[in-house]
Amino acid sequence: MEQIKTQKIFSGIQPTGELHIGNYLGAIKQFVEFQHKIDSIFCVVDYHSLTEDFDPKIKQEQIINTAIDYLACGIDPEKSILFVQSHVTGHTELAWILNCITPIAELERMTQYKDKSKNQKSNINVGLFDYPVLMAADILLYKADLVPIGEDQTQHVELARKIARKFNNRFGNTFPEPQIRLNKTARVMSLSDPSKKMSKSHGPKSYIALNDSPDVIKEKISKAVTDSGSAKNSKTNGGKNLLDLFSVFVDDESISKQFENDYKNGELQYSKLKPMLASVIISSLKPIQKKRAELAKSPDYVHQVLIKGKEKAEAIAATTMREVRQKIGLL
Ligand code: ADP
């Protein structure tokens, strides 16, 4: 990874269900690399997860599981700040202030809002519409200048940049304009419908969860849609998605080059690629799963991490909020 001139990164993951390899490759993998280079703040964005239908009885469990996923993937709480969004009041306070300088028309343009509104017709709530402003508040509260994310979130970070600029122009220089950082695998596609991104909301057949067993992984990969079959008319082809996945999980680059050549020449045998892909995914996820199982047996440790994370995050957030309140005339 090249050296980057940034001060601080922020990123978040919603506690909405099990994490999948799209979240890992698009987001967490680069978080783990970044934490060794610059100040890093990672958040379980539980307020965001309330914008979808949810069950309050399992919300706590989902929050803890997402924290465990971060830790199992390699987030080191000695190097990074790991905490839960709702534990720090500044997120919603700043979101309200930013709401008052964000034009409604900007939010109406957000493609994720339009997509999610179609998927949850009976629950198009104000939070879903306002989600990008809360996300801008998450980032700006820590004056983060780099946001590593998957491609689906780029429009939201662009809006956060606009909001930062608007605030700075009106009230004086306060926030850096956050830069977007995309991985090579910023858009992993669904296994069952490669025209869509891999997502928790498209059901378990569409994704490989970080915690899937070897048998489940083999089964899902064997059934993954390729370039033929039902996805023939889809905008994205499943074969390329499987090849991309293979290239990031395999150690020996020459094997993936060979498969890519076969693909270009129309000679790729999925009966060969698929079992090998399943095997490299299984072995890559094994250490994560092992660590996950250990952490699940240590709930006290996970709680301690989140309490310490909250204290560190809150200290930064309180300083920003004081400055913001002064600048807008509330203090
Ligand atoms: P989901 O879309 O599965 O509900 P989140 O909204 O919690 O996941 O996203 C967490 C992070 O994972 C974000 O940075 C998001 O951009 C990234 N991400 C989600 N899905 C994918 C994907 N299919 N490919 C690459 N990155 C992804």
Image: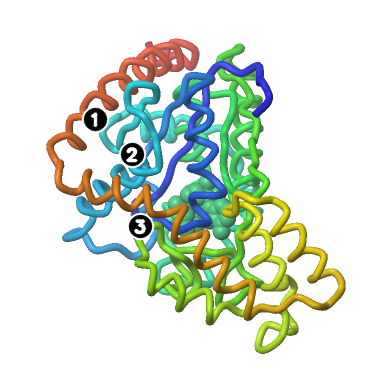
Position of 225 with respect to 302 (left or right) is: right
SS at mark 3? loop
Q: Please tell me which of labels 2 and 1 falls first in the chain.
A: 2
Q: How far apart are marks 2 and 1 (CA)?
A: 10 Å
Is 266 or 154 nearer to us in this picture?
266
Quadrant of residue 321 within the rendered picture: top left
Residue at horizontal 45 percent and vertical 33 percent from the top: 138
**Residue to which mark 1 is pinned:** 305
Q: Nearer the viewer, mark 1 or mark 3?
A: 1
Question: Which quarter of the rendered picture does the N terminus lie within?
Answer: top right
28 relative to 312, above or below? below
Q: Mark 3 points at which residue?
A: 16
Q: Which residue lies furthest to the left in this view?
A: 300
Give coordinates of residue 19: x percent, y percent: 40, 56
Vertical placement of 67 versus 57: above or below? above
Q: What residue type is labelled 3?
A: Thr
Estimate the x, y position of residue 235 in percent, counting from the top left.
75, 73
Marks 2,1: beta carbons within 8 A:
yes
| Whole-percent x, y for residue 114 in the image | 59, 63
> Which residue is located at x 44 percent, y 61 percent?
282
In contact (CB < 8 Å): disc 1 and disc 3: no
- Within 10 Å of disc 3 (Cα), the crowding (few <14, some 14-19, many 20+) is many
Residue type of the residue flagged with mark 1:
Val
Q: Is mark 1 on a helix, strand or loop?
A: helix
Looking at numbered disc 2 in the image, what kind of residue is underneath it?
Answer: Leu
